[in-house]
Amino acid sequence: MRDSDNAIHISNLSKFYGKLQALNNISFTIKRGDFYGFLGPNGAGKTTTINIITGLSNYNAGSVKIFGHDVTRDYRDARRLIGLCTQEFNFDPFLSIAQLLVYQAGYFGIPKEEAKSRAATLLQRFQLLDKKDLKYRALSGGMKKRLLLCRALIHDPEILILDEPTSGCDLELKFLIWDHLAKLNKEGKTIFLTTHYMEEAEKLCKTIGIINHGRIVKMDSKENILQDKSLQDVFLEVTGIE
Ligand SMILES: Nc1ncnc2c1ncn2[C@@H]1O[C@H](COP(=O)(O)OP(=O)(O)OP(=O)(O)O)[C@@H](O)[C@H]1O
Ligand SMILES: [Mg+2]
């Protein structure tokens, strides 16, 4: 298999915060076009892994490659292939919704006029176009979640990484986001998602990895993982956490 078929390739990755080992020698590969669900209890190391994949955090050992680009040595090439939907809202409070997206596009060298047009298309797709001149604080929680998605998609990345994209969303919004994510995956985007909702992983994902105390304790196709049990039971079995 060519390296370019491996969207994310993590090899023997370890990360310490002081004495705390957040990641303990993890290795796994996500293939192009996969919809990967990364599950684990609070504090398991999910966001730490995402921060390393996206170059927001350093690490102590191992390597991470995005379509063959090392996230440290080829940071720019690796980063432009990823759209990140963060767990927290971290928008600039002084910019309008539309400006936020145009600025984000600027980080990836997209000219302003092109960025404006992409922003309008995304805001339309996520039903936020009528809010484009507001500051993000004027949005409801669910609208902010959708704005995170627009920001992640503005440079049309190959890989979309989502850290708990539907936490705190009502059912209707959850279904809307699921629908969009399924479509994006069908259109060819590789998706890496963390979630605490077993139903979300069961419905959307093709491959599932379970992390606990900084170690990958199970990873397989969803079908294999779900062979005789619900994901809830598998999760309970490998983490001991209900
Ligand atoms: N900046 C930091 N400084 C020190 N410790 C940290 C830092 N970030 C995370 N940790 C610790 O690393 C471990 C893994 O945290 P991480 O945020 O990766 O977990 P998570 O799986 O994303 O959890 P959650 O489901 O609650 O979001 C935890 O013990 C956490 O306290
Ligand atoms: Mg997290």
Image (tube, rainbow, N blue to C red):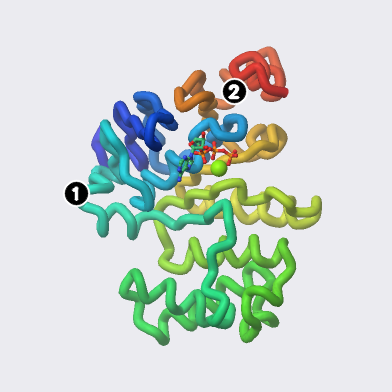
Quarter assignment of residue 11: top left
Amino acid carrying label 2: it is Glu
Residue at figure coordinates x 51%, y 82% from the top left: 99
Local crowd size for mark 1, using a 10 Å CA cut-off: few (<14), some (14–19), many (≥20): few
Local crowd size for mark 2, using a 10 Å CA cut-off: few (<14), some (14–19), many (≥20): few
Quadrant placement of the C terminus: top right
Question: Measured from the top left, where is residue 187 in percent x and y?
Answer: 50, 54
Q: Which residue is mark 2?
A: 223
Question: Measured from the top left, where is residue 110 in percent x and y?
Answer: 35, 76
Residue at figure coordinates x 43%, y 72% from the top left: 104
Residue at figure coordinates x 37%, y 45% from the top left: 53
Left or right of 194, for residue 114: left
Disc number for residue 42: none
Circle nearer the viewer, 2 or 1:
1
Q: Which secondary structure, mark 2?
A: helix
Question: Measured from the top left, where is residue 72 in percent x and y?
Answer: 24, 48
Cα distance, mark 2 to mark 1? 36 Å
Total labels drawn: 2
Classify the position of ligand 2 by quadrant: top left, top right, bottom left or bottom right.
top right
Using the image, determine if residue 151 lies above or below residue 169.
below
Q: Which secondary structure, mark 1?
A: loop
Quarter assignment of residue 64: top left
Q: Which residue is mark 1?
A: 73
Sequence-first disc among 2 and 1: 1
Q: Residue furthest front?
A: 19
Q: Residue furthest left?
A: 73
Residue at figure coordinates x 68%, y 80% from the top left: 131
Left or right of 141, for residue 125: left
